Image (cartoon, rainbow, N blue to C red):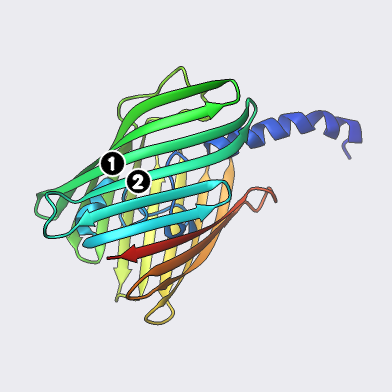
Amino acid sequence: MPHPLSLIKKLPVFLFVYLIVNAASAQVYNSSISAATGGTGRAAVEAGDASFLNPATLVHLKGHYLFSSFAKDELAITLSDNSPESFLPAALGYVQKKSDVPQGELKFSDINMSLAEFVMDKWAFGITGHYFEFKLPNSSYRQVNGDLGLIYTPKSHIGWALVVYNVFGENKDIPEAFRPKTSVGGGFNYIYQAMVRFRLDATSESIYMAGIETYVNQFIITRFGYSNDTDEKRELITAGVGFKGPRFALNYAYQGNPQISGDYRHSVDLEIPF
């Protein structure tokens, strides 16, 4: 059995690693729908994920949507438009987060704009521009970057996606622990008889995700998922429930690390079509 003093000596190292994992665990923001299904959604069409996971999905998001998401020390708001009057499917988004890192409290914000269009039959392309800002007690960093997304929908119930994040490269002045990384993500979406949806995603950062959604009735949806970051050895078990009504949608998600009791996230989203 390890000596108690050896455990105490290892505690600062554990806390340092834990803070790094929490600060750098998410390169993209996840809505409650995505969070409840393991972080998937690059090939799915959701108002809360188009600006963050894959801008190309905006072409399938018909009408206007106001989306807001709330979690501990996190806030996200997007406004999307794909109405007949719009020139191109577009969205504006804003994210702010606070977290603890070894340098102190980190305040992060992201102002983004997305555009999308069909490039050929069943193929759509999208682009998102980001303005990132990081604030620490004694320093701050800013960066402009962008994402490129592609989605292929051979059938209305099947989708394949590919996204490149932060295509302009990494800002080496930003500490590596929370620096936006250049990465690639892919996704698959399959809807079975309009009642069950299967989602599979993976990224070049060795994160593998799977999720499932089932309709309990016309309005209630249950969600479950799993995510495995093999580089960081971080697994997440996820679950959630949603209400999708004619005037608004409300979604809740839970993500939890079964190996670290304090590594969890709750979030609630409100989506209003208009």
Which disc, if any, is residue 113? 1
Q: Work out how far the residue at label 2 is from the one at label 1, CA to CA, in angstroms.
A: 6 Å
Q: Residue furthest left?
A: 120
Q: Position of residue 241 (x, y in %)?
A: 49, 69
Q: Amino acid at mark 1?
A: Met
What is the three-letter code of the residue carrying label 2?
Gly
| Percent position of residue 36, x then y | 49, 60
Whichever of callouts 2 and 1 sits on the residue coming sooner in the sequence is 2
For the C terminus, the image quarter is bottom left
Q: Is residue 175 left or right of residue 61?
A: right
The tag on residue 93 is 2
Secondary structure of the residue carrying tag 2 is strand
Alpha-carbon neighbours of circle 1 within 10 Å: few (<14), some, or many (≥20)?
many
Query: In this image, 28 relative to 163: left or right?
Result: right
Q: Residue at x 65, y 53 (%)?
A: 258
Q: Quadrant of residue 101?
A: top right
- The residue shown at (28%, 44%) is 162
| Numbered marks: total | 2
